[in-house]
Image: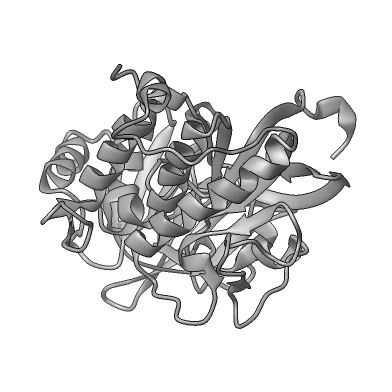
Amino acid sequence: MSDAIQTDVIKTDVLIIGAGPCGLFAVFELGLLDMKAHLIDILDKIGGQCAELYPEKPIYDIPAIPIVTGQGLTEALMEQIKPFGPTFHLNEMVETIEKIGDPLFRVTTDAGQVFEAKVVVISAGGGSFQPKRPPVPGIEAYEGTSVFYAVRKMEQFRAKELLIVGGGDSALDWTLNLQPIARRVTLLHRRDDFRAAPHSVDQMRQLVAAGKMDLKLGQVTSLEGEAGQLTGAIVKGTDNESFKIDCNTMLPFFGLTMKLGPVANWGVRIENNLVPVDTQAFETDIPGIFAIGDINTYPGKLKLILSGFHEGALMAQKAHRYVYPDKRLVFQYTTSSSSLQKKLGVN
């Protein structure tokens, strides 16, 4: 990507890759030690796996909280880190990490945003969430031009003949959100039974009844169009008969899968799709780059949120040395330190 279209470089003490619970709590631990953080996440929401995979599923092993949902935990962590004013960059994926100083890293995302940070914390869960590609021959040729797996800007779909494929919340939510601005929306699902919120399904059926959009049943078997520009989709119906849906844009929502993804290209050592770290500060083989949470591995590792919280606390102690090399770190407790309480706004 040329410098001409890159936005200004964002400078920060610490850049956290992944805005799940461990990344969020790391903001707190860093903030207590006067380090500012920016967070990047590939998802369009804060909370990582908790928010994306089980927002309403109860979690029972967070210390002192007998039961909390993934969404509830995310909201509580956001409240806890509010005094430290972190900045979030959602819907972005880190592509490259380059060492440019000692310590200083230049990090670039797929949106062309460039960061410079003294410390990088990889808190990417099992890797990055990536959309499941539908089993349609040749779909790759249309991706990024007329087939999209996420909606980053709704305006991009204005006046389009839009085919949305899927039966879950994402498919229904975007059907309802894009119907008013698209030229025509067709929702395609393999059966007349949806996994989405009943209210959303009712709204969709009302639009279909009013003739404001179409609902078709079946599965896409092939795509038509040249040079990446879609003109239609061939669908095998529930009666095994094929028919064509005219469309110039397609949004398939087949769920998300966890892949190590770009982490493998960031220069840190990888073992069995995990990042090995030391147990003193959860630092990778590159000084100044840490890994906390499910993405890391070390002897005795437990993939628990509470383990990631502990790892974030020790990471912050070592990170302080890189951000403030001339400042002595004095260990303090939030219960008794008036300076820490002042940072938290409780003094």
Residue 27, percent from left and from top: 47, 38
Residue 1 in percent (x, y) is at 84, 40
In this rendering, would 301 be left or right of 217?
right
Quadrant in which residue 119 is drawn? top right
> Could you say where residue 317 lies in the image, as x and y percent from the top left?
56, 47
User: Could you tell me which residue is drawn at 58 percent across and 59 percent down?
Assistant: 281
Vertical position of residue 307 compared to residue 73: above or below: below
Q: Which one is nearer the viewer's eye here, 84 or 249?
A: 84
Of residues 181 and 216, the one drawn nearer to the viewer in this rendering: 181
Quadrant location, the C terminus: top left
Horizontal side of 82 relative to 324 (left or right) equals left
**Coloring basis for residues:** one colour
Residue displayed at 21% across by 44% down? 72
* Residue 165 vs residue 16, the one in the foreground: 16
150 is higher (above) or lower (below) than 344: below
Q: Is residue 126 visible?
A: no
Q: Is residue 168 left or right of residue 326?
A: left
Q: Which quadrant of the view contains residue 200?
A: top left
| Towards the viewer: 298 or 67 | 298
Image-based side of 86 in relation to 322, left or right: left
Q: How many marks?
A: 0
At 52% across and 26% down in the image, what residue appears? 155
Q: Is residue 85 above or below residue 212?
A: above
**Residue 130, percent across and down?**
52, 60
Report whether residue 227 is seen: yes
Identify whether 91 is placed above or below 166. Answer: above
